[in-house]
Image: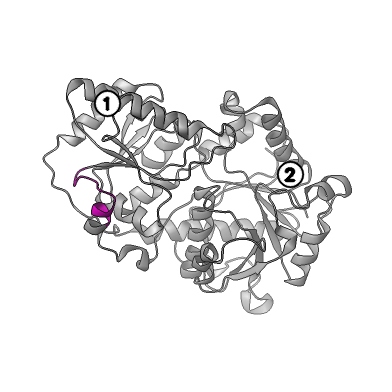
Amino acid sequence: MRGAFLPRRASPTMCDGSGITPVAERGPRRVAFTYVSRRRWAGGYNYQANLFAALARHCPGRIVPVLFAGTSEPAAELVPFSNVSGVEIVQSEAFDGRQAGLAAALVTGIDHRAADAFKARRIDVVFENARFFGWRLPIPVLAWFPDLQHLKLPGLFSPFARWRRDLGFRVQIASGRSILLSSESALTDFRAAYPGASNPVVVARFATEPSPELLTGDAAAVIAEYGLPSRFFYLPNQFWRHKNHSLVIEALTILKRRGVDVAVAASGSTEEPRKSDYFGELMREVAERGIEANFRYLGMIPLAHVYALLRSSMALINPSRFEGWSTTVEEAKSFGVPMILSNIPVHREQAGTGARYFGVDEAEVLAGLLAEVSQSPEPSAVRSLLPGLDKRVAAFAADFVTAVEKCVDPFGCPS
C-alpha cells in the first residue's frame, strides 16, 4: 500500500519530538474532536476520555484536544473531559445533531459552519469519526476507522445502512484523509476491503489508565448496591447485536440445566439503532428461561461503578462477534482481571495467551469455561492497577502524536 506506514512501538520518551519541529518554535498541535455521547457509544466516549488523559500525562504540551459538542449535550457528561489538563470544550450549534452539516459537506465539499468553528479555535488537525466535514476542508484531517464491521458482519446491517457506512469510508479515503486504525487486525481488514487506497495509515493501539478518582470507591458497597453475590462475572458491553449477549444467555441456560449456579452482571446502553427492541427481546428470553438470577442487567451505571465491578469480578466476559479493539479487554488487562473472550482475531491480538477463549457460537464451550472459573477456590479480591501499565499507555499516546505529526506533514497527510 503506497504511502502506508506503521508507527514505531513507542516508549515514554518518544514524545520528545525527535525529528519534528520543536514545540517551543511552533506551539502544541490543536486537534479538533467531535464529542461522542456515552449513551450512544460508550466505547467511543471512553476512547476520547482515555486518549486525552494519556496525552496530558505522557505527552504534555504536544497536543491540545479541542472537543466540539452540541449545545444540548449534558454538562455532566462533559465534566470529565474538562477536568483533564489542557482540554478545551466548545459547545456550538454547528455540532447539534448527529448529521449536522453532512448535506453541505457532500454537496459543496465543505461543512462551512464546522469549518468556521475550527478556524475560530485555530485548529491544526481535525480528528474525523462518524462525521464527514467535506473534501474541501482546508485543514489536515485524521480519520479514525474504529472497525469494518459492516463488511465482516453484513447481516447485522440493512442494505442501506451498510451502503451508507461503506460510502462514508470511501469518501474519506477519496478525500485524501490519513487513516487511523486501532489494531493490526483492523489493518488487515482495511487492506482487504480497500486494496487501491494509497492513504497514509497509522495503527495506534488503545490503552487505558483510569484516573485515580474512579478507583477510590468501596467495591463491596457497589456490589451490595446492585444486590450481586460476592462471586460474579462481568459483561460491560453495550447491547448491540454483534456484542453477542445471546450466547451468554444460552450458556447460562445450559448451566442451569446442569445445576451450576453462576451470576453474570451486565451493564451498558440498551440502544441498538439497527433493531430497536433488541434489548427487550433478550430480557424476555432471560425471563422465559428462568435465569433472571443468573443474568442481571444493572443499567447504564457510573464509570466508577464499572471499574469497581470489573476489579472485583471473577472474570470479564466479552462474547463479541467483532471488535476493532476492545475497550473492556484493555481495562481488564490494566487490573489483571481474568478474561473469557470470544476467539476472534483482535481478542487474540490483545490478550494472547492471557485469556480463555470460546467460539462465537459455542455456548457449550462458554458454559464449561464459566463453570471452571466459578468453581475455582481462588478467593474474591479487589484488584489494583498492574505495574508496567504506564508503558502501554505511553505508547498509545506517542503513537497518536506520531499520527498527528504525519498528518500535518504535507508528505504524510494530504489536506
| Quadrant assignment, res 384 | bottom left
* Colour mode of the rendering: one colour
Kindly state the secondary structure of the residue where label 1 is placed.
helix
Give the Cα separation between the discs numbered 1 and 2: 43 Å
| Quadrant assignment, res 251 | top left
The x and y percentages for residue 9 are 48, 53
Q: Quadrant of the N terminus?
A: top right
Number of disc labels: 2
Q: Name the amino acid type tagged 1.
A: Ala
Q: Residue at x 20, y 30 (%)?
A: 371
Asked if 57 appears above or below 349 in the picture, the reply is below
The x and y percentages for residue 21 are 66, 70
Q: Is residue 320 visible?
A: yes
Q: Is residue 99 magenta?
A: no
Q: Quadrant of the C terminus?
A: bottom right
User: Which of pointers 1 and 2 indicates the residue nearer the eye?
Assistant: 1
Circle 1 crowding by C-alpha within 10 Å: few under 14, some 14–19, many from 20: many
Magenta-tinted stretch? 222-231
Q: Is residue 100 left or right of residue 393?
A: right
Kindly state the secondary structure of the residue where label 2 is placed.
helix
Q: Which residue is mark 2?
A: 172
Q: Main secondary structure of the magenta part?
A: loop
Q: Is residue 245 visible?
A: no
Q: Which residue is mark 1?
A: 367
Q: Is there a contact, CB below 8 Å, between mark 1 and mark 2?
A: no
The x and y percentages for residue 242 are 50, 31
In the image, 89 versus 56, the foreground residue is 89
Q: Is residue 120 left or right of residue 91?
A: right
Circle 2 crowding by C-alpha within 10 Å: few under 14, some 14–19, many from 20: many
Chain-order first, disc 1 or disc 2: 2
